Amino acid sequence: MILTSVLQAMGLFVATNIDDIIVLSLFFARGAGQRGTTARILAGQYLGFAGILGAAVLVTIGAGAFLPSAAIPYFGLIPLGLGLWAAWQAWRGDDDDDDDEAKVAGKKVGVWTVAGVTLANGGDNIGVYTPVFLSVEPLAVVAYCIVFLALVAVLVALAKFVATRPPIAEVLERWEHILFPIVLIGLGIVILVSGGAFGL
């Protein structure tokens, strides 16, 4: 069970954080030549992501405590809705609000700046992680959080690599708009079906 949770956590982290590689790589480009840039970005990313995880866990605890168990599977509508919205935006080409350069424009590469951008960019992550956390055992939630936190360092390392190779960043940015909606829609359907929502 733990191995399954670890693999699922890895897949979920990749799907929900591909766009962060682009944002972080822009921070690396902005901080090129400055001492301590990597340490500040790493610390900021950990602070921001810890905030995202903390919020998701708190919402999960609240929902689990106050909602009847029969209502839990319907949280699958959240990633399903987010996925359909992302697919609609990708199809229409309305990705202006996701302009990665705008997210870091005019911002110095400081710990709190990176943390703030990470947290602001992670609102959809909370909406995705909460239904998943509600649908698994508490031990699996701990496994998810440990894997997520371990992968943050990998994410920062990849962003640093991408910052020196713009063609890779372009490929990631192109595929993120396709991968993200597919994963969210699939995740929402799995949560709804496995929980027996709508009598499925």
Image (cartoon, grey):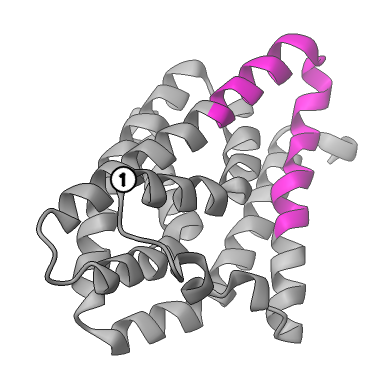
Q: Is residue 78 magenta?
A: yes
Residue extent of the magenta highlight: 55-82
The spot of residue 31 in percent (x, y) is 23, 67
Which residue corresponds to the image point at 66% horizontal and 46% vertical from the top-left? 190
The spot of residue 151 in percent (x, y) is 29, 46
Asked if residue 41 is positioned above or below residue 27 in the image, the reply reads above
Asked if residue 198 is positioned above or below residue 26 in the image, the reply reads above
Type of secondary structure dominating the magenta stretch: helix
Quadrant location of the C terminus in the rendered image: top right
Front one among 150 and 11: 150
Asked if residue 100 is positioned above or below residue 170 in the image, the reply reads above
Which residue corresponds to the image point at 17% horizontal and 48% vertical from the top-left? 39
Please state which amino acid type lies under the numbered disc 1: Val
The residue under label 1 is 111
The spot of residue 174 in percent (x, y) is 49, 83
The spot of residue 62 in percent (x, y) is 69, 16
